[in-house]
Amino acid sequence: MKLIYSFHTALEGIKVHKSRSILTIMGIVIGITAIIIVLSLGQGAQNLILSQVQGLGSRTIVVIPGREPKGPADAAQIFSDSLKEKDVPLLKNKLNVPTAETVMPIVFGGETGEFQGETFRLTIFGGSETLPQFFDIYPEKGIFFSEEDIRARADVVIIGSRVKEELFGLTADALGQRIKIHGRNFRVIGILPQKGQVSFFNFDETAIIPYTTAQQYIFGIRYFHRLFIQAESDSAINQTVEDVRATLRASHGVSSPDKDDFFVQTQADLASRLGVITSVMTLFLVAVAAISLIVGGIGIMNIMLVSVTERTREIGLRKAVGATDKDILTQFLLEAILLTGIGGIIGVTLGITIALLASIILTRVIGFGWQFVFPWSAIVIGFSVSTIIGLIFGIYPARQAARKSPIEALRYE
């Protein structure tokens, strides 16, 4: 029996039992679909996260209070109050950090903004006059606050596009108006263009005020949540990091690196860590989705065993007219591979379609800057795994069919 005839016979066997064949491959379809979706959306999420991190620019260095977390037990250390007012002039001093171009303290938190009965839950972002150059965002209308406003703890605010829309509507002019935040009136001096997410901060829903004002009147604190430092050039980043660490250790009286009450991150460090985290999570989800492939493989093996029993007389007739054990083995093995192969094709097509639709929804409806990623590797994996499963789980039923005695098979009722 030639291979092409075995293939034709296997295909006819699948066509004869269409309903059973469809139910058999459902496990494979679900598993491959899940893998395609997870890998496509996982890569899309990784690209989105990395693009947000890189939105700060490669020269930006972030100092975070607390010990750098090495595990769950250290997570609470992130919320330490170790970054104080005295640290800022020390870091700005060229004798301490000669390659630092700009140093900006940051405080942030959630508050409710109010204007003439309209309220909106916004993010308070307390920064300095250098904030626009860090995030590349400048008022579309009005101006940004000045260094004098910071020293005077001025009640001035720059609001994001959605804050303006929610509190003032689409047509009203917000400039010069006063909004109430935490019981205090702030004069609107600037309105930001629609910007969206920049390094985890959604500036459309943000109210930016001088950090001194935010510390004293909004949060009631005397420390900073972050220090943003911009190095003079990409080549100076490593030196700047070392100088920042040395300066803060001297300022905080830290005698050795393992006692640091702060940690420093560059954009490259953060991108690398987030890339590892998202990759591990994607692989974990793929492993979970792959379980359904094993279940589907077992289902195929069971159905093939039932098929072998039902087609015992057919096997006997084929052997009686000259088919060898190898021919019978090849026929049933091809049936199993065809079933899983068809399941793989359907799963890949369905997975890509769902991943594309999900990307469109995330981009247009929710407003994320999500890009659809065509998962070539997942497609290769999908076809390969489905074929291998058909081969592995089809061997046992095929061998059972090949071992049947032609005489006993012909007598089977």
Image: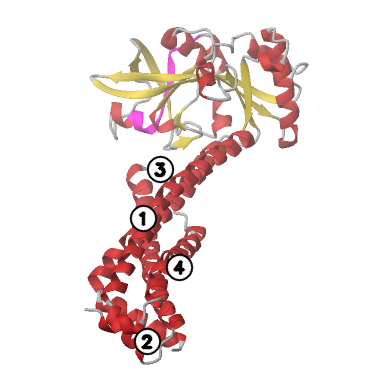
The CA span between labels 4 and 2 is 23 Å
Q: Which residue is mark 1?
A: 295
Q: What amino acid type is highlighted by mark number 4?
A: Leu
The disc, 2 or 3, on the residue closer to the chain's N-terminal end is: 2
Q: Is residue 192 left or right of residue 308?
A: right
Q: Which residues are magenta?
A: 153-164
At x 78%, y 16%, the residue is: 95
Whether the magenta-drawn stretch holds residue 161 is answered as yes
Discs 1, 4 touching: Cβ within 8 Å: no
Q: What amino acid type is highlighted by mark number 3?
A: Phe
Q: In the structure shown, which secondary structural element does the residue marked by tag 3 occupy?
A: loop
Q: What amino acid type is highlighted by mark number 1?
A: Val
Q: Is residue 127 visible?
A: no
Q: In the structure shown, which secondary structural element does the residue marked by tag 4 occupy?
A: helix
The CA span between labels 1 and 3 is 35 Å
Q: What amino acid type is highlighted by mark number 2?
A: Lys
Discs 1, 3 touching: Cβ within 8 Å: no
Q: Is residue 10 visible?
A: yes
Q: Which residue is mark 3?
A: 368
Q: Which residue is mark 4?
A: 391
Q: Is residue 340 left or right of residue 222?
A: left
- Percent across and percent down for residue 113 are 33, 20
Q: Nearer the viewer, mark 2 or mark 1?
A: 2
- Percent across and percent down for residue 34 are 38, 53
